[in-house]
Amino acid sequence: MATEPMPTDPTTESTAAAATTKNRKEPAYLFSEKQVAEKSELARRFLDNRTRLNENVHKADNLLVKRFYLLDHNTYLEGALPAKYKELMGLAASACLRCDDCIYYHAIQSYRLGGTRAEQEEAINVALVVGGSIVIPHIRRAYELLTELYG
Amino acid sequence: MATEPMPTDPTTESTAAAATTKNRKEPAYLFSEKQVAEKSELARRFLDNRTRLNENVHKADNLLVKRFYLLDHNTYLEGALPAKYKELMGLAASACLRCDDCIYYHAIQSYRLGGTRAEQEEAINVALVVGGSIVIPHIRRAYELLTELYG
Amino acid sequence: MATEPMPTDPTTESTAAAATTKNRKEPAYLFSEKQVAEKSELARRFLDNRTRLNENVHKADNLLVKRFYLLDHNTYLEGALPAKYKELMGLAASACLRCDDCIYYHAIQSYRLGGTRAEQEEAINVALVVGGSIVIPHIRRAYELLTELYG
Amino acid sequence: MATEPMPTDPTTESTAAAATTKNRKEPAYLFSEKQVAEKSELARRFLDNRTRLNENVHKADNLLVKRFYLLDHNTYLEGALPAKYKELMGLAASACLRCDDCIYYHAIQSYRLGGTRAEQEEAINVALVVGGSIVIPHIRRAYELLTELYG
Amino acid sequence: MATEPMPTDPTTESTAAAATTKNRKEPAYLFSEKQVAEKSELARRFLDNRTRLNENVHKADNLLVKRFYLLDHNTYLEGALPAKYKELMGLAASACLRCDDCIYYHAIQSYRLGGTRAEQEEAINVALVVGGSIVIPHIRRAYELLTELYG
Amino acid sequence: MATEPMPTDPTTESTAAAATTKNRKEPAYLFSEKQVAEKSELARRFLDNRTRLNENVHKADNLLVKRFYLLDHNTYLEGALPAKYKELMGLAASACLRCDDCIYYHAIQSYRLGGTRAEQEEAINVALVVGGSIVIPHIRRAYELLTELYG
C-alpha cells in the first residue's frame, strides 16, 4: 500500500541517513558463510545459487531494489532485540509464509549467530502452529538442513 | 494466534485423550501406499522423498511437532464426514493454498479411499475458482498425477 | 496466471455453453435464504449487506465479472460430488484462506443443503489444521453463526 | 528474506540518495485528497482514519518504518511506467492480496491521476482472475467506492 | 466465495457470449512464443514444460477448467487498458503472490508485447514493495529470465 | 497436509502426555489480562470480544478444536527460547500474515511478559520488511494499541 512519505526534506533525510550509518551495528557472527558451506552441502548449494542469481540483480543496478536490499539488511542488525532473535523471527516469519529460500537463509543466519538447534526448532514450532499443516513440507526440508548444520 | 487453553485439568485431559483413542476410526483404504507407488512413478517419488525427509523429523523427536502430526492425522479419520470427503477437502484446501506436496498427499489419499477421478477434478475445481489462476500451475501438476493414477 | 485458451472456435464454444446449460443441475435447497435470515440475525445482516453491495456490481455490468460470477455459481452445482460436499469444501477453502464473508456464505449454503453442525465443524477442522492458528479468529466468528443457525 | 546489502560505501550511498532525490518526479494529480473526500463519503472516512492512525506511527519516529514509507512512496513516482499505471498495478496487487485499505488507497490514487472507471475495473478484473472468488467480497466494496467516485 | 449468478437467462447469456466474441481483440504480439524460446533457454524450458503438462489438462476436457482458461485468456485482451499494461499487472500480481510459473508467463507476454526491461523492473518493484522481502527469491529468478530476454 | 502420525502406541502417547505436563512451564506474567484491559481501551474491547466468542467455541466442545487450542497454548511456554521472545515471534508471524486479532493478542502477551515498546516495534519491523506494504494498515492499528499500552 502506497503511503505518503513522512514529512522529510533533503536535510532531514540526509540526517536520517547519517543516523542509520551511525546506529548500524553489524552482528558478530560466530561462523562465516564459507564455514557454513563447508559444514553443510545443502547450505553450500543454497548460498552458491543465491550468489549466482544475485549477480544479475546487482548488474541491473535498479535503485529501488538496491534500497530495498539495504533496508532488509538493516532490519536484522543488533538493536533493541539481539540480532539472533531477529533472525529467528525472520525464520518463523519465513516458515509461516512458506518460503524455502527464506527459511534456509534465516536458519543459516541464526546458526552463524550462535542459535542452537533447540532454539531453531522452537521458532519453527511457532510457524507450524501459526501457519498450519501446509508448513510441514517446508519443515521437513528445514530439518534436513538443521541436521547437516548441527548433526 | 495463541489462545488460552480451554479449561482442562490433568484428569480431564487424560479423559479427552482416552476419548480420542476410543473414537479414532482409521479409514478403510482400498489401496496401500505401496500399491499407489507401483501404479504411479510420480507418486512413488513423492512418497519416497517424504519418507526420507520425515526420518530427520522423527529423529529430532520434537514433542510439539509430534503432537501436531498426531492432530493432523486425527483430522482426517472417519467422523461426521466420511474420510474420503475430508481428504478431498484437504485436497481443495491444499490446492487453493498452492502447496504441491500437500496436493500430492491428499490426491493419493483420496485415491486410496476410492475417490474417482471426477470427484478429484471437482474438488480441484473448487480450489481453482476460489483461489484463481495462480492455482493453474499446481493444477497442471495435479493432473499429471491423476493421469498416472487413473489413466 | 494467464493461459492460452484451449482450442475453441465459436462453434465449439457455443456447444460448450449449451452443454453447461444442459448439465447444470441446481441443488435442492431445504431452506431459502429468507428462512435462514429469519433464523439467524448474523446471517440476515450478512445477506442484506451482500445484496446491497452486489447491486453496484450488477449495475456496472462488467462482462468479465459477470462471467466469473457465473463460473463461480456453476462450480457448486450437483455433479460428481453432491452439492452439499462442495459447499463444505468451499467452507474449508474459505476458512483456510481466512475470508469471513466467504465462510459465512458457504456455512449458510451448507446449512441450506442439509449439512449438520457436526459436518460443518469437521470441515472447519480441516481448515484449522491445514491453515493453523491464524484461522482461529475466523473460527470464533463461524461458531457464532453456527450457534444461531443450529442452536 | 534478509539479504546482504549490495556493495555500498557511505560515499556511494549518499550519491544514491542524491540520485533518488534528483530523479524523483512526483506525479501531477488532477484532484487533491480533499477534493476526493468531498466527492465520496467512503473515501473521506478512509482518508480521515488513515491520517488519524498515521499520527501514532509518525510520533513513534521509528527509523526503519520511516524508510519503508519513503521507499513505498518512491515506488509509485513517474518512471519508465507512468504513475497512473503503477497505481493501477498497486490496485491489482492489493486486490489479489485482499487488503481493503490498500485497495481504497490505490483506487483513490488512480482516480486522482485521471484513471477512468473502466481502467480501474480492468485492473480489478486482473486481480479477480488471478486471485479467485475470495477476491469477490473486496470487489463488492471496491465497486461501492468506484460508484461514489465516478457515479 | 460462491455467488448467486447475476440475473441471466439463456437469451441474455448467449447475447453476452456474442458480445465477448465481438469485443475480443487479441493483442498484436511483436514476437511469437517460438522466437522467445529461441532467445532464452529459460523461457524455452518453461514453455515446453507448460505445453507438456497442459496436454493432460486438455485431454481431461473438464468443462469448468476450460471455461476458466477462457476467462483467464480474455482478461488480458486489449480493452480500456492496453494489453501490455495488463500483462505487466499480471506480472506484478504474480510476483506479489509468489508464483514463479506465473511470473515467467507474464514476463514473457510483456516481452512479446513490446514491454521494455525498465518497464518490467518497475512492475516487479511494485510487487517487491507491496509483497516484501519474501518476494526477493522470485525476483532473483525473474531477473535471470529478464537477462536472457533483453541481455 | 495430512501426515501419518509418528510411530506411537497408547503407552508412548500417554508417556508423551505426561512429559508435556511435566515440562510445561507457564511464563511469569508481569501483568494480568485485567490490568492490561484497565490500561488500554482497545485491549479491553479485544479481550472482551474474544472471551465472548470463545464461549460458543467452548460450549461446542469439539475435541479437535480443544486439542488445537492446547497445542497452541503450549507453543508459547518457556522453553529453549524465553516465552517473551516466542510471543514476539508470534507477533511478527501474525503481522506478516496480516491477522489483526492475532497481532493484538501477541502484542498484549509480549507486554504482559515485560517486552518493551522498542522490542515490539522491532518485531513488527521484521514483519513489515518480510511482508511488505500490505502490512502497513495492520501496523497502523498495532501502533494505536502500543500507544495505549506504553503511552
Image: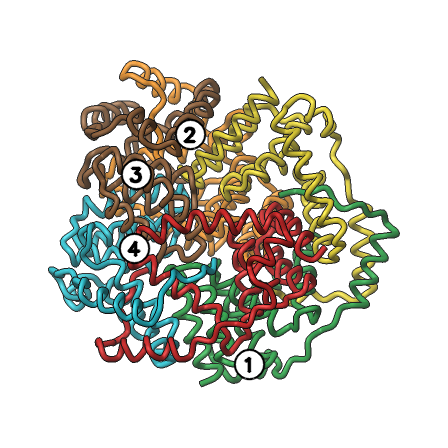
Chain colours: A orange, B green, C red, D brown, E cyan, F yellow
Question: In front of the other: label 2 or label 3?
Answer: 2
- Residue on which the image places disc 2: D45
10 Å neighbourhood of mark 4: few (<14), some, or many (≥20)? some
Task: Name the element at disc 3.
Answer: helix
Q: Amino acid at mark 2?
A: Arg
Please give the count of numbered marks on the rendered protein. 4
Measured in 3D between alpha carbons, the distance from the residue under mark 3 to the one under mark 4, in whole angstroms, is: 36 Å
Is there one chain holding both mark 4 and mark 2? Answer: no
Residue at the (34%, 15%) spot, across then down: A15
Q: Classify B58 as above or below E146.
A: below
Q: Relative to residue C125, is residue D125 drawn left or right? A: left
Q: Amino acid at mark 3?
A: Val
* Disc on res. F7: none
Q: Amino acid at mark 4?
A: Asn
Q: Chain of mark 4?
A: C
* Disc on res. C62: 4
10 Å neighbourhood of mark 2: few (<14), some, or many (≥20)? few
